[in-house]
Amino acid sequence: MLNDIEKIIEKVKKDTNNIGDIVYREKYIHKRKVYILYNEPLASSDKISDFIFRSLNRISDNKINVKNILSIIENDISNFKVKTISNYEELCFYLHRGFTIILIDGEKNGLVLETKADLSRSISTPNTENTLRGSKDAFVEDYQKNIGLIKKRIRSNDLWIEQMVIGKYTDTQVGIVYVNGVVKEDLVNLVKEQLSKIDIYGIVSSDSLKNLIENESKSVFPTIITTERPDNVSTALMEGKVAIVVDNSPYVLVLPAVLSDFFKTSEDSYGKWKNVTFTRIIKCMAFFISLILPAFYIALITYNQEMIPTELLVSFSAQREGVPFPALVEATMMLISFEILRESDLRVPGFTGSSLSIVGALILGDAAVSAGIVSPIMIIVVALTSISALPFSEPEIINGLRWYRFLFMIGASLLGIVGVVIIFIFFVIELTSLNSFGKPYLMPYAPTYLQGLKNSVIKFPTIKLTKRLSYLSNNIIKQRNDNDEKN
Amino acid sequence: MMKKIKLLILLLPIFLFTGCYNYRELNQLAITSAVGIDLTDDGLYRVTIQVLNTKKNDKDSNASEVPEFVVYSSDAKTLQEAFRKIILDSSKRIYANHLQVLLIGDKLAKSGIKDIMDMFFRNSESRKQFLVLVAKDQKAENILSILTPQENLSSKNIKDSLTIDSIFLGVGQLITFEEMVDNYINDNKEISLPTVELRGPVDYGEQTENIEQTSSETRLVSGPTAIFKDDVLIDYLTLKESIMLNFVNDRIKNTVVSYECGENKYVVAELLNTKSSLDIATDPLKAKLTVKAHSNINEITCNLNLQDDDVIKEIEDNVKQKLEDDITSTMKKIINEYNTDVFGIRDTLYKNNPKYYKQIKDEWYDKYFRDMEIDVNVDLQLLEKGNALRVIER
């Protein structure tokens, strides 16, 4: 009950420690005391003075029935988003979202008016997922804008959004987005269940939410896609996936995600199928090179020399001559210095980046070789390994690869090729045992799923990809006509 | 959770206590590319190994100043002891998995190579795919220490030149150790090995000056085939006989045949896609060799009219006849002079008619082999006569 406004105001002041952010403006309209409250940093002062104050002044100038003052204000005020509130909790909820609150002495209900300030940046180009073709807009930190970017692409009644609020302090708005009729309902229910289970003081971005809902938190491989491209999200939604939009986060979560999804980019749907297939084969090669190459090299030169062609062995041997460390130490040293370089390159401000890369190139390259610390061939191995991890835009994949790369190297240094094989068995065991929201992680390879194989390493012509994947959707026919007949 | 950790601690030793079995860093290995074995005058084995020199050359110095390989040798009563004694010389462990060439000295080959076969066959570390050659009239030790102009490693030079020769000329034959031992153990075919010859002074060939000239004074040349009976070298064939022997063994891919069509005038035919097959008829014992080949005429010094089909036919017949004669005479020579079955006739006989083979097996050399009839049949197809229809003549 908001009858006693003085008391209410006192309570707000007390609960917020009377910070200066909240503006309490007293005003009399036909001798009724009116309080106008708003949170200064979150609300736009222009909107408040231009529309709300002017409207209130006009109302107080006119002759009105004082008894109906609340409904008169609600009618006459120049703001399209008006809502009545009836208790203190609601008042606080809106106050911290940039709304302006009008409380009138003696009235049971108060009014809230939308006067949010625009605190988010404007839509800009993607930073981490660059493509040559395709749309150039990316998600921003504003929930409404992000939803808008998706709705702009899927203009249908069937784009359903379920909203939730998560976090005791942050009160973060979270939206579960899916296309009704395409998505499998149990997936949506599973996501809702996972989200409602979350009991946390607050989340600030989609990534912290990701860690809370991921069911395979022990694995190093990601089971949820994070993307900043609305076109990626829209495509995924139409395939039957679910997106989670989190306020204040320019990354949208898309799930479920299996390993082969991380080999796909939005460019794949724009390119010719043969070219896309070639690119994907190269990516697969890069995946395995990045995973196994250093381990394979260590195994070959410390245990299985007979596998190296003689001419190559001679040059390997000549280059290894005089290197004081075992091959494992040599490789680890170089890979770790590369990881340090990569990490610091991400963190330093742009203008010192170039000097960093010069130093890095010198240390990792020529100087280390001429100082006799590493062999030139190791530089090639490390360089090839490192650049092979980079075609993947998802950093979790790169980091997962890195984790296993070191395991493979340890295996190789203990048992040679046999060690590599043993670790590879563990690697496959881990991948096959993973699931992303109930979907096997190695889909469509294991279990083999023909429809999925048509768009895996090999991409069939788009005109032939007429069906959705049945593990994602019950409504597997993509064409509009078939759909209409069905309805 | 504790259980898992305990399990992990129990599992960890499986990896850690392997003791890194068979761990060896690449730069601690002396990569052996060739082994030469000789018999010294005292009756000891002398083992010579050619090891790749992987010492890093300084960037500024000219790479050719440092020899690309080092030769170590040692003497002992047995081969294995001799091999081990090399470690006294070398600072690195001998690593024979990349062995390319096994070279057998002339003297040792003439006294028998059984021991060598046993030692390498028993040894688990080396591959059995290396080539075996005989150092013709020379010590293997000398040949392995020669610097060769085109290849840094003389063993690679030997291997490559033998390979090329076996493809385009057909004097040599690529015989791996495995094949040799297989032939020897199965007793169906006598050993015949390719050879390598040394031309020029040995001492000079060991110095870098040898390869700094356009025409090296000391050089290695692929030689004719050495034929064995049992495990003992009997004699070396001539180059031409070597080619003919390879025709019988179906080892010829390409070669060149010529016949005299006038006084000091020749027709030269190149044979391609050669295939030969040996067939044995019993009662009386008769070896039938069929050689099928395509042929190009590459050189003609007689004045022949190539537009005339009869002339072409005549050339074809003559080449055929010449080849048949040569093969027959070579086979006859080997049978009569050396009495050794390097053709694998017993092998063919055993495969075709094992019962009969068992009957005659014991008296093979005494009775049957010598009296065997030989029938060589060449099936030649002339494909090209070259670009000119007439012989260039004024």
Image (spheres, rainbow, N blue to C red):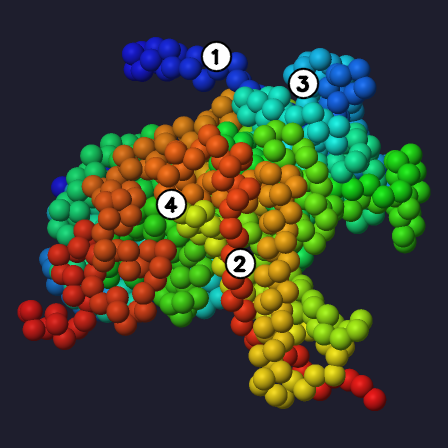
Check the picture and name the quadrant holding the C terminus of chain B.
bottom right
Q: Which residue is mark 4?
A: B352
Where is A272 relative to B203, above or below?
below
Report in which chain the residue with disc 4 lies: B
The local crowd at label 4, few if under 14, some if 14 to 19, many if 20 or more residues have their Cα within 10 Å, is some
Residue A218 x %, y %: 33, 30
For disc 1, the chain is B
* Identity, as a three-letter code, of the amino acid under mark 1: Phe
Q: Is residue A356 above or below residue B291?
A: above
The span from disc 4 to disc 3 (Cα, nearest Å) is: 39 Å
- Residue B25: x, y in percent? 64, 25
Q: Mark 4 and 2 residues: CB-CB less than 8 Å, in contact?
A: no
Disc nearer the start of the sequence (1/3): 1
Which label sits on residue B376? Answer: 2
* Lateral position of residue A136 relative to residue A197, left or right: right
Which circle marks residue A138 in the picture? none
Q: Nearer the viewer, mark 4 or mark 3?
A: 4
Q: Which residue is mark 1?
A: B17
The percent position of residue B179, horizontal first and vertical second, equals: 54, 37
Could you confirm whether marks 4 and 3 are on the same chain? yes
Residue A464 visible, this orientation: yes
Between the C-alphas of marks 3 and 2, the distance is 43 Å
Q: Badge 1: how crowded within 10 Å, few (<14), some, or many (20+)?
A: few
Q: Amino acid at mark 2?
A: Val
Question: Depth-wise, is mark 2 or mark 1 nearer the camera?
Answer: 2
In the rendered structure, are the residues bearing label 4 and label 1 in contact, judged by CB atoms less than 8 Å apart? no
